[in-house]
Image (cartoon, coloured by chain):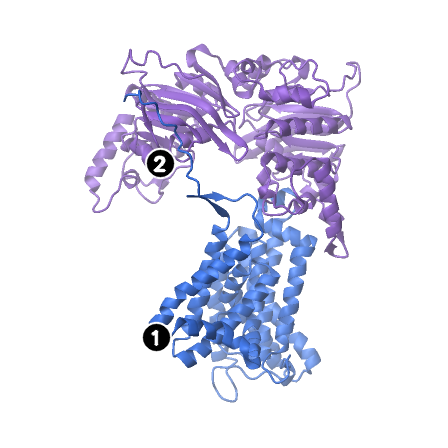
Chain colours: A blue, B purple
Amino acid sequence: MKFVLRGREPRWVAPTAVLVAVAVTVALTALPIRLAGANPVAAFERYLLTPLSSVNGLHEVLLTATPLMFTGIAVAIAFRAGYWNIGAEGQFLLGAVGTTWVGTTWADLPAPVALPLGFVAGAVGGAVWALAPAWLKRRAGIDEVVTTLLLNPVALLVVQGLLNGPWRNSATGFTDSDRLGSGFDLPPLIPDSRVHWGFAVALAVILVAGVVLTRTATGVRVRAAGQAPQAAAFSGIDVDRVQFRAALVSGGVAGLGGASTVMGVQHQLTSGISNSYGYTGVIVATLGGLGAIGVLLVSLLLGDISVGAQNVSLVLQVPTQLGAIFSALLMLAVLSAMSWRRYRVQWRRPRPATTPEPAQETG
Amino acid sequence: MTPQRAGADADPARGRALLELAGVTKRFGDLVANDDVSLSVGAGEVVAMLGENGAGKSTLMKIAYGLVRPDAGELRVDGRPVQLGSPRDAMRAGIGMVTQEFSLVETMTVSENVALSAVGLGRVDAAANRRRVMAAMERLGVQIEPERLVATLSIGERQRVEIVKALFHDCRVLILDEPTAVLTPQDVRSLFETIARLRTDGLGVLFVSHKLREVAEISDRVVVLRRGRMVGDRPTASVDEAELAALMMGGAASAAAAPAGPSQSRAGAVADPVGGAVGLGVETRPTAGPAEARPEPVLRLTDLGVSTGRRALLSGISLTVGAGEIVGIAGISGNGQTELVDVLAGVRPASSGTVHVAGRDLTRADVATRLAAGLGRLTEDRRGSLVPQMSVEHNLVLEDLPRFTSRGLLDRGAVRRHAEQLIERFDIRARPGDPVATLSGGNMQKVLLARSLVREPRVLVVAQPTRGLDVGSYAYVHEQLAALRDRGAGVLVVSEDLDELRGLCDRVAVLFRGRIVGELPIAEASSERLGLMMTGVEVAT
């Protein structure tokens, strides 16, 4: 038995690989669930199916998926261009800071002005936070993985600094910001639910990104720059510029996620506003194959698991972290499956490299 | 062409075959990297392996070092068949290799680096190790303080540390992959002294190079690879440089040795095969009267130079290509061809001189301007000009995106139709949506050819257009280039294949050490004359 690189990939391979990865993940997570004293089958049912079986559960899944849709597509845009932006977390936070600034400074603005302004401020905040690493990469070739990653804790410190200093809540004295003006409250998208218009904005962003990446000349340039920079440069594409712009757009989209969370859920800035959405965005983008539809589906799936995890911990008394373990293992399994799928198995034994010598040969 | 093994029994000390490769064949997809190659290295013998880039040298060495398994054939060490599954097996069998990229840890000392390759579990006896390193260096005549950090060593010194490392494993056959490529002349001298000591010690050395002068100096025997086949195996004393150059690049001298596979099918592929003296002549050359005035040049290079730091890679290149003319650039690889093509393609800036296409100065123009001015490019690195995971249709429009955009969106119907037309016209064996990575080398080259030719360039710069291609694609590419010339464009062909140049070009210029040493009309470009020029002998033109 031998593994051989595939030439052309048949259509069934990619979906099969994902299914195999999911099966492996389920098998692997069964053990810790068992150790936590719960029945794995019941647990999986609650992780995956329970949230989808009630209207309220469905709403919660959409709500939880919203920030992941922003950060997921943000990361996917940068990765497509070959710019490894691991800084969506920081860009998300700075987006939230931008929105909070306009929302508390001009708290009296009416909604038709306030909401667009809030999103613009978020996008600018995220793009500004993405600017330094992108500029360093373009000017000096400094590895963006390191710079974007290291700016994440810095962004959190900026948020904490603001909340402990100038932005401390003037009414309660807690380390949360003042509430944003009521014009900045994103209205519910579905009546009597917590799902807000941020979800619609996220859908629109994903749709636009998908169209640009697959249906425009810009998209072809971005993909060429990401997949084969040398060939792209040979064909007259300014790879550095493409990556620089993708980095800023990526930061801006992550910042929109911050804006959406501030205006739609928290209505104020808190230091825990991100809940690692930026890091999870890397998982979403990778599992989603850096495509628009993939990002959407994976966001919804992770939203589902995350809502399910709360349910599981309440009902079956297992730690909520098992949900995170499930997502993490799923990521590892899918990535492994994606690399294995490039091979096919050759069952026939390969011919030996040497033909057997005739018996008369003597050493 | 099996190496002579008679006499091996007569003189056991010298000439006994230490390492033998018998009938080794290796294929990568439809590319035959090594075709029934047999080679032996005896004790106390320095064998030089010559061959152009892509001739199959590296594959053969990787096979000998256990990095690649052959599809057929046998390896023997000391006459016993061996199976080498990894470099570890090779080391155990007494084979050592020094590659062009060194594997040294810069922040460690020389003796630590040498010990690293032999380290097992448990404690390291530093003192004993140092003594052994000193002994190995003594044997080589190398004077490097074992306590020095590798980071402080020159390239030449690092290379010698690599050799010491190889010898540490009691290696009896040492393979040196283009050892002089990175060395200064002084370092080359000391390397040769080291090799001479190894030979006296009874080691076998396989020395891979394409520098003829060095080969003549250091080796006892020369083997020449060309397109994966062994085309020559001679005692060094009996050959001269011009003959070796001709063997490497497929001049008349090799016609007898290598069965001229391409020529047979070419006769069928080309309508008029009359007068194919070397078998590869495409008889599409226009028979313009000799009195006809030189055509207006579509490409003019004036005093073009490229240098990195103080080193001049190209200097004083002045050359014109007329409309309806194919001009060839011959030369042994590494004499400035890559730099010339890169400068013309617009991916490397010229340090001096100018490039004019149809009278327009493009010296500092970006790629898009070059393309718009009618300069087409077809470079040797297919993967450097195609995006492998992208579809054939997108690769075909990559240089022409604005033309396929309407109202901000890519006109997918137009892109598809464009691809279908080119696939039909250039006989590309692929569907528009297939990723380019799944295509064969020949079909990739056709995609590139289609992409450049569809713009009807006024001048096309082509590098190694047929390297690695099968016979059919080889003929096809040549026909297309000749047809382009006949439509009135100029073509500049850089190639390391003399048959190709002689079959295709009207004129050939020869590069040597970054300079043009001469230019010959094709009728006067015999392999002997070209061979001499390629070794730096200036020929009056």
Element assignment for label 2: helix
Question: Is A350 above or below relative to B197?
Answer: below
- Residue B19 is situated, as x and y percent measured from the top left of the image, at 35, 24
* Label 1 crowd (10 A; few <14 / some 14-19 / many >=20): few
Residue for point 76% across, 19% down: B286
- All told, the count of numbered labels is 2
- Residue B348 is situated, as x and y percent measured from the top left of the image, at 60, 38
Q: Chain of mark 2?
A: B
Q: Depth-wise, is mark 2 or mark 1 nearer the camera?
A: 1
Place residue B531 in its image quadrant: top right
- Residue B306 is situated, as x and y percent measured from the top left of the image, at 59, 33
Q: Could you tell me the amino acid type at mark 2?
A: Pro
Place residue B144 in its image quadrant: top left
3D distance between C-alphas at marks 2 and 1? 50 Å
Q: Could you tell me the amino acid type at mark 1?
A: Gly
* Label 2 crowd (10 A; few <14 / some 14-19 / many >=20): some
Question: Is A271 above or below relative to B99?
Answer: below
- Can residue A329 be seen? no
Element assignment for label 1: loop
> Which label number is shown at residue A37?
1
Determine which residue is flagged by label 2.
B87
